[in-house]
Image (cartoon, rainbow, N blue to C red):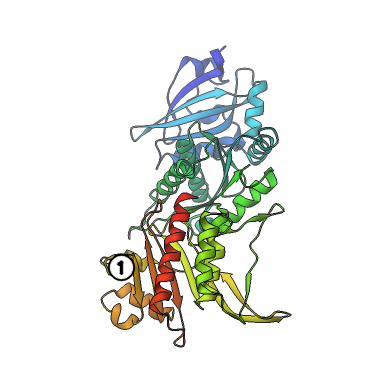
Amino acid sequence: MLRENKGTIVVNKELEIISTDQGYRDYVNESDSKTVFANIHPDDQHLLYEMVEALDTNSTTVVCFRICDRNGKYRWVNAECELSGSDYITIAFQDISNIDGRARAAEQDSLTGLYNKMAITEYVRKECEHNKARNINLVIIDIDNFKQLNDTMGHAYGDKILREVAGIVIEVLGNDGRAGRVGGDEIMLVIENMAEKTDLRIYLKSIRERVESSHIDQNGFPLVTVSMGIGTFPTYVDNFEGLYSLAERMLQRAKSRGKNRYVIYNPDIHGAIIAGELDESLMELSGDKSLDKKKLVLDSLDGLFCTMNEAITSLIKKISVTYCFEQVYVFYKDLGKSFYGYKRTGESSETSTGKVLRIVDNVSEFIYVTEPGFESRFDAYGVLIVDNPDEQLKESRGARRFFTENGITWAFLYKMQSVPYDGFIVFYYTSDNHPKLTDQDINNLTYLCRMMEIAIKIR
């Protein structure tokens, strides 16, 4: 009998057998067959065709299927398939139908080779229950516009994309974590003992960029991208349910901010977790009396660096109310990274304390900052005031179009340079009757932005 139940087959792209090794001949029921299908379970034969399609764009892939052994029994095998040259495929398989192997087969998603939903979920759940001191990063990956891909290109193409994304995840992750398919196009990734977000981003960035570059249309735009949401245990949550919910919320934010990006939970950016739930409630501030500007600066200095109880999200909302800005955003120059922003709505309500202003989560486009020469407009303090968009931006077509289409009449832009990724903090007025800001107001805003930049860097 075959030692460790292994064997190798070489086939062409029509899945006709070119050669076999002794292990294969000792293992299968029909060793002299000219086609590989003589020994493959009828329900699994389509997986071999899909494997050939997957190898059209990748040099290797993994697939599980059932082979009929010498005793006429179908046994599960795990096969590593490699494209040799342009015509031949080497299929190296191992029987996984022993006691341990049955467990492995039961845990495996047959399409992608990843763990299935039950296996990966139970693994993370047990890690959260028994390793309270162990850092666990849970990543939920979703293929952007996957339904549209299926509808326009067919389900076989969608399956091919799933296998490719799974292959990229497996290669990037290596032995540093586990991955499982938990939904139609949703993958759960577990990376443990990695407390530094910079180290974690290496994996996330590699996955995002490799998927993005895997299929490019004739105009140079990516056809396939992924969005990712990340939560961390036990830093922010103390159980699996909270961890999964947090990662899901961050995935939703990645989707709402344009897709093709990852969002790692940060309480200073995304809000605090209260009683196990992410607090995403709308912020309401009294509109009857303006906040004292000097007190805002001093309180922010204390909150950001002394008591460290001031969240950046809270601060930019306070700035919006104090200076009556309609919109405020913090984002990275690399627009693939996450950003966040708020706008004041026209809605207000009357309470026992008077009129209440409402500020809601909002997104915006910022491609205009990448125009050649745009950054040269900023002064030595990293500040750009746009108080006459038609005149100031007439040489920047993208910026002028953006300001016109969005009705922006005045803007304060601050360029960050000390954060891990260069970025910007911007404040917009979208009405002509906005308050006139004094030189002291501009100085205060510059100082507040500088404090936020430092806080983003050190937190």
User: For the point 34% across and 80% down, which residue is it?
Assistant: 389
| Quadrant of the drawing holding the N terminus | top right
For the view shown, which residue lies furthest in the bottom direction? Answer: 433
Closest to the observer, 70 or 272: 272
x, y percent for residue 33 = 50, 24
User: For the point 25% across and 76% down, which residue is it?
Assistant: 395
x, y percent for residue 419 = 41, 53
Residue wearing tag 1: 378
Is residue 129 among what the camera can see?
yes
Is residue 147 among what the camera can see?
no
Left or right: 16 as drawn, with respect to 41: left
Q: Is residue 34 above or below residue 401?
A: above
x, y percent for residue 326 = 50, 77
Q: Which residue type does callout 1 highlight?
A: Phe
For the view shown, which residue lies furthest in the right direction? Answer: 352
Left or right: 48 as drawn, with respect to 120: left
Q: Is residue 202 above or below residue 435?
A: above
Q: Which element is circle 1 on?
A: loop
x, y percent for residue 115 = 60, 36
Q: Is residue 277 above or below residue 85?
A: below
Quarter location, residue 11: top left
Closest to the observer, 453 or 240: 453
Task: Answer few, some or many: residues within 10 Å of disc 1's Cα (few below 14, many 20 plus, some between 14 and 19).
Answer: some
Closest to the observer, 419 or 82: 419
Left or right: 417 as drawn, with respect to 339: left
